[in-house]
Image (cartoon, rainbow, N blue to C red):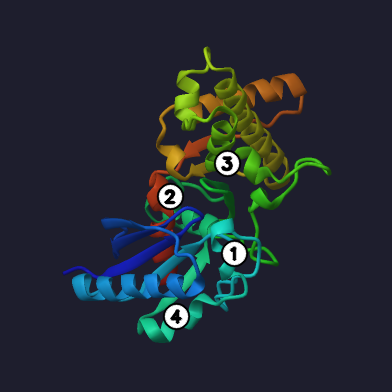
Amino acid sequence: MTKRYLGLDVGGSSIKTGIVDGEGQMLERGRLPIPENYEGFEAALLEQVELARRKHGVLGVGISSCGGINPYTGEVFAKIAPSLQYLIGKNYYSLREKAGLPLYVEKDGNCAALGEIWTGSAKDLRNFVTLVLGSGLGGAVAIGGRIHEGANFLAGDVGYAFPLRDSGSYSPLIAPVAIENAYQAETGRRLTIPEMKDCYGRDAAARKYYDQFMCELANVLLTMQYIIDPEMFLLGGGISAWPELVPELERHILELVRTKDCGPLVPKVRACTHHNDANILGAVYNLLLRM
């Protein structure tokens, strides 16, 4: 049997699980609800480790987590999803002894980038930015084919930034779950962003929130293009599987460049090859690199 590893992706709305082999193939997938407290969270993760060990003989655990993560100490130190506030100040590496296996953690944006470096859309890239579109807006910067951590391990996390001094952060303006929540709060109905596009011409609220998502995301990419000057932007998260995402975003980028007369650079965009699996694959790749 090939060597196998457990990947865990701790997000704002669920914990995704995956069994991954040493070649980067996803062999099994699962999903858990977010536990109500830290004790439940720790128990849920350790239960997955024990199950993976018994069923698959896994040799280690890679964790992708939202929030600010120090990958060397395992500490969660920065703003995190509301459902996971109890993780702030906790340390993922406190689970190592109980797990009885090598265990490493990295922030979700970096994991998405690592998954694409390993077996995905970044195999031919040296300098790129990854943005993970989900419950929040995670990100990563790769320079020279390697992840740029930043002085505080938050490089690329544009979701924490504020587009204007008196505005909210980028995350609720762009994160698909936040867009869908805002639409539901206004209309009492729930639509995904692709569904908003489908009823764009006959639903004013869908049109408003769809345009917000596309225009604000285009603005983020154009801004980051002049700060980092990457070869490519890779888009991850579940919405990256939507075939119209990249062409629609490219159209909005070109319109922004035209109307703002903002210079010669036009951001190039790709979807992550692994979509929702990128974080888990990257978590396991990070584990292999650090082991």
Ranked by sequence position, the earlier of labels 3 and 2 is: 2
Q: Quadrant of the C terminus?
A: bottom left
Q: Which residue is mark 1?
A: 85
Q: Amino acid at mark 4?
A: Leu
Q: Earlier in the sequence, mark 4 or mark 2?
A: 4
User: Distance of mark 3 from mark 1, alpha carbons?
Assistant: 17 Å
Q: Quadrant of the N terminus?
A: bottom left
Q: Which residue is mark 3?
A: 178
Q: CA distance from mark 1 to mark 2?
A: 35 Å
- Residue 204 x, y percent position in the rendering: 59, 18
Task: Report the number of discs.
Answer: 4
Q: Classify mark 2: helix, strand or loop.
A: loop
Q: Nearer the viewer, mark 3 or mark 4?
A: 3
* Distance Cα–Cα, label 1 vs label 4: 18 Å
Residue at the disc numbered 2: 123
Name the residue carrying label 4. 95
Circle 3: residue type? Ala
> Contact, CB < 8 Å: mark 3 with mark 2?
no
Q: Is residue 244 left or right of residue 128?
A: left
Disc 1 and disc 2 in contact, CB within 8 angstroms: no
Q: Residues within 10 Å of mark 3 (few under 14, many from 20)?
A: some
Q: Nearer the viewer, mark 3 or mark 2?
A: 3
Image height of 192 relative to 24, above or below: above
Q: Is residue 86 visible?
A: yes
**Is mark 4 in CB contact (under 8 Å) with mark 2?**
no
Task: Give SS at disc 3.
Answer: helix
Calculate the distance from the C-alpha at mark 3 to the C-alpha at mark 4: 31 Å
Marks 1, 2: nearer the viewer: 1
